[in-house]
Image: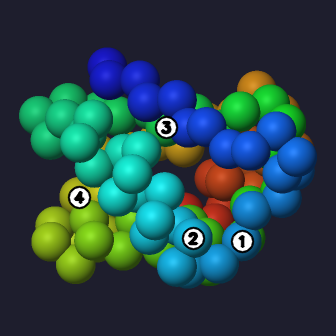
Amino acid sequence: MNKINLYFDKSLSHIAGNPYGQEVYLKQIKDQLKLDEENEIYFPIQIKGVSISFIQGLIKDLVNKYGKEKVLQLITLKSDNEMLQERLNRNIKF
């Protein structure tokens, strides 16, 4: 299991936008991703909301390369905030 911790400005509690999701993927995930094992991507506790557009941007390159089913096997989005975890589980399936 490969664990990737995401970092955001401490003043952010909600994140949105496809371009911002792509930026976070390129800067924080791409070089740490291991294609031969499951990757858990952790959002910091201060993040209370994540838009669908952000998630779409976050996984865009992976979906284009491997398809959505493979991406769902490859990564899991995690948060210690239970409400956010529920949203992440719903949003990644869209």
Q: Nearer the viewer, residue 34 or 87?
A: 34
The local secondary structure at tag 3 comes to strand
Q: Nearer the viewer, residue 19 or 87?
A: 19
Give the number of callouts.
4
Foreground: disc 2 or disc 3: 2
The local secondary structure at tag 2 comes to helix
Dots 4 and 2: beta carbons under 8 Å?
no
Question: Which quadrant is home to the C terminus?
Answer: bottom right
- Distance from the alpha carbon under mark 4 to that under mark 2: 23 Å
Q: Which label number is shown at residue 57? A: none
Tag 1 residue? 16
Q: Earlier in the sequence, mark 4 or mark 2?
A: 2
The kind of residue on which mark 1 rests is Ala
The kind of residue on which mark 4 rests is Lys
Decide: is 28 above or below 26: above
Q: Which label number is shown at residue 20? A: 2
- Distance from the alpha carbon under mark 2 to that under mark 3: 16 Å
- Distance from the alpha carbon under mark 2 to that under mark 1: 7 Å
Give the percent coordinates (x, y) of residue 51: 73, 70
Tag 3 residue? 41
**Residue 82 makes an appearance in the image:** no
Give the percent coordinates (x, y) of residue 6: 56, 38
The kind of residue on which mark 3 rests is Ile
The kind of residue on which mark 2 rests is Tyr
Q: Earlier in the sequence, mark 3 or mark 4?
A: 3
- Distance from the alpha carbon under mark 3 to that under mark 4: 16 Å
Q: Which label number is shown at residue 70? A: 4
Residue at point 35% right, 34% down?
A: 39
Give the percent coordinates (x, y) of residue 50: 74, 61
Dots 2 and 1: beta carbons under 8 Å?
yes
Foreground: disc 1 or disc 3: 1
Foreground: disc 1 or disc 4: 1
